Image (tube, rainbow, N blue to C red):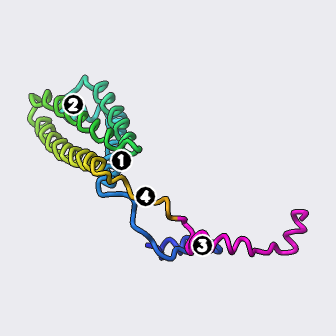
Amino acid sequence: MKYVANILRSKGDPQIIETGPSSLTTADNLARGLGWFSIGLGLAELFAAGRIARAFGLEGSETLIRAFGLREIGAGMATLSTEKKAGLWSRVVGDAMDVMALLTALDSPPRQKANVKLALLAVAGVTALDVIGALALSAQQRRGEEPKDMSGRSGYPKGIGASRAVARDFKVPRDMRAAVGA
């Protein structure tokens, strides 16, 4: 990966000599994926409420589906923020609301009833991921496993001391001094 990043750097930019471990845990990565999924689903519910309502036999419930879309977007934004745990737990509550709404559609015609069953299965799977992520983040906080402390990393390939020495010994070319009036 560092080789790709070095190709994309401008001439004169410092090169990446080595990469370190990510400060993100598996639970953080799961939360990020679920956050983006939530935003995408929310946008679909917001802008395609009519199609979703027809697919599940919920005609007349478009406003509710749009409200669920707004809820999904809010939960996704919370999940992508520093409040990942609260975002994931709000997704779990939202999943329960989705299940309740879908259960009311089980008396739909056969084609739509099949769609509802498939949606219930999908919601169950996503709910499991939401619960796993929320429990993992909760356990991580209880154990004190906050994301890795990266404050000791300078971002300078040879350390900040070496960079300061280079800056201190840097001589401004004569033509540049004339340009700035020094």
Residue closer to the observer: 89 or 113: 89
Residue at (43% x, 69% y) in the render: 20
Residue at which label 1 appears: 36
The residues tagged by marks 1 and 2 sit, at their Cα atoms, a distance apart of 20 Å
The disc at residue 149 is: 4
Q: Residues within 10 Å of mark 2 (few under 14, many from 20)?
A: few
Labels 2 and 4: the sequence-earlier one: 2
Residue 180 locus on image (x, y percent): 87, 63
* Residue under label 2: 97
Secondary element at tag 1: helix
Which one is closest to the eye, mark 2 or mark 4?
4
Name the spot of residue 148 as percent of width and height, x first: 39, 58
Magenta-drawn segment: 154-182
> Which element carries disc 2, helix, strand or loop?
helix
What residue is at 48 percent from the left and 73 percent from the top? 4
Q: Looking at numbered disc 4 in the image, what kind of residue is underneath it?
A: Asp
- Closest to the camera, between mark 1 and mark 4, is 4
Q: Quick one: label 1, few (<14), some, or many (20+) residues within 10 Å?
A: some
- The answer to whether the residue labelled 3 contacts the one labelled 4, judged by CB atoms less than 8 Å apart, is no
Lower sequence index among marks 3 and 4:
3
Name above or below for residue 104 compared with residue 20. above
| Furthest-top residue in this view | 60
Q: Quadrant of residue 85?
A: top left
Which residue matches tag 3?
Answer: 14
What is the CA distance from the residue labelled 1 to the residue labelled 4?
Answer: 25 Å
In whole angstroms, how far apart are the C-alphas of marks 3 and 4? 23 Å
First of labels 3, 2 by sequence position: 3
125 sits left or right of 170 in the view: left
| Cβ atoms at labels 2 and 4 below 8 Å apart | no
Q: Pick the quarter of the image with the N terminus.
A: bottom left
